[in-house]
Amino acid sequence: MTDYGEEQRNELEALESIYPDSFTVLSENPTSFTITVTSEAGQDNETVQATLKFTYAENYPDEVPVYELLSQENLEDNDIRDILKLLQEQTEENLGMVMIFTLVSAVQEKLNEIVDQIQTRREEEKKQKEKEAEEAEKSFHGTPVTIENFLSWKAKFDAELLEIKRKRMKEEEQSGKNKLTGKQLFERDHNLDTSDIQFLEEDGDRLSASISSKLQDLCYRTRGTGFR
């Protein structure tokens, strides 16, 4: 017949010697205790931590112990779910054997993985920010001019300019076909023969008025200065 009490006491003594700084007995009936597990430090000396609470069932190790994650540091919700799932898998696999050291070791490895994942995620975020900054700077300054892209741009520009000239010549040619000759304009409006003379006379009057105004202004400015 298995002496569950003795197996539990022996395991407690072993756990206390293995984890002297993180093992704490909470109660003796039922036997309940905590073990704090800390990951190895990452590249930035960052760690994650979990405090596990175990309570022996009466017939442990033939019954699984009650376990819970009592507290944590730097863990996300999905990390906590993964740890609890891992503990469930490990208790089922090790049923019938003392298993607390095995459970704690599994959690220790999981915490180390989480630290690595945090570091990898931060490096990816850093690279993404650097990429976005480079793209923003390139967009601000524009694309650097090279011989290749300048020649490509010039070819497109020349082609567009040639097309514009062709359209303009076509429009002028079409306009020339529809344009009336001088004789046709004269026959349509007899007043056109005097229109140019009228415009010249009006321009002459405006020019004379402008010259007269400037002379008057000059006389006003030089009056009293001794200038004659």
Image: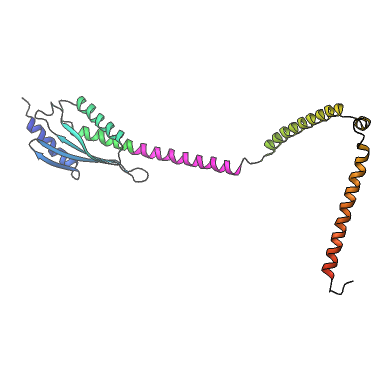
Q: Which quadrant of the view contains residue 184? A: top right
Left or right: 9 in relation to 194: left
Q: Which residues are magenta?
A: 115-142
Q: Nearer the viewer, residue 15 or 114?
A: 114
User: Horizontal and vertical percent for residue 123?
Assistant: 42, 40
Residue at the image position 38 percent from the left and 40 percent from the top: 119
Residue at the image position 60 percent from the left and 44 percent from the top: 141
Residue at the image position 85 percent from the left and 67 percent from the top: 219
Report the colour scheme: rainbow
User: Horizontal and vertical percent for residue 15?
Assistant: 16, 38
Q: Which quadrant of the view contains residue 217? A: bottom right
Decide: is 217 above or below 153. below
Numbered circles on residues, count? 0
Q: Nearer the viewer, residue 191 or 158?
A: 191
Residue at the image position 78 percent from the left and 29 percent from the top: 167
Left or right: 76 in relation to 166: left
User: Horizontal and vertical percent for residue 91?
Assistant: 20, 28
User: Horizontal and vertical percent for residue 143?
Assistant: 62, 40
Whether residue 126 is in magenta: the answer is yes
The C terminus lies in quadrant: bottom right
Left or right: 155 in relation to 90: right
Magenta segment main secondary structure: helix
Q: Which quadrant of the view contains residue 182? A: top right
Q: Nearer the viewer, residue 226 or 56?
A: 226
The N terminus lies in quadrant: top left
Whether residue 130 is in magenta: the answer is yes
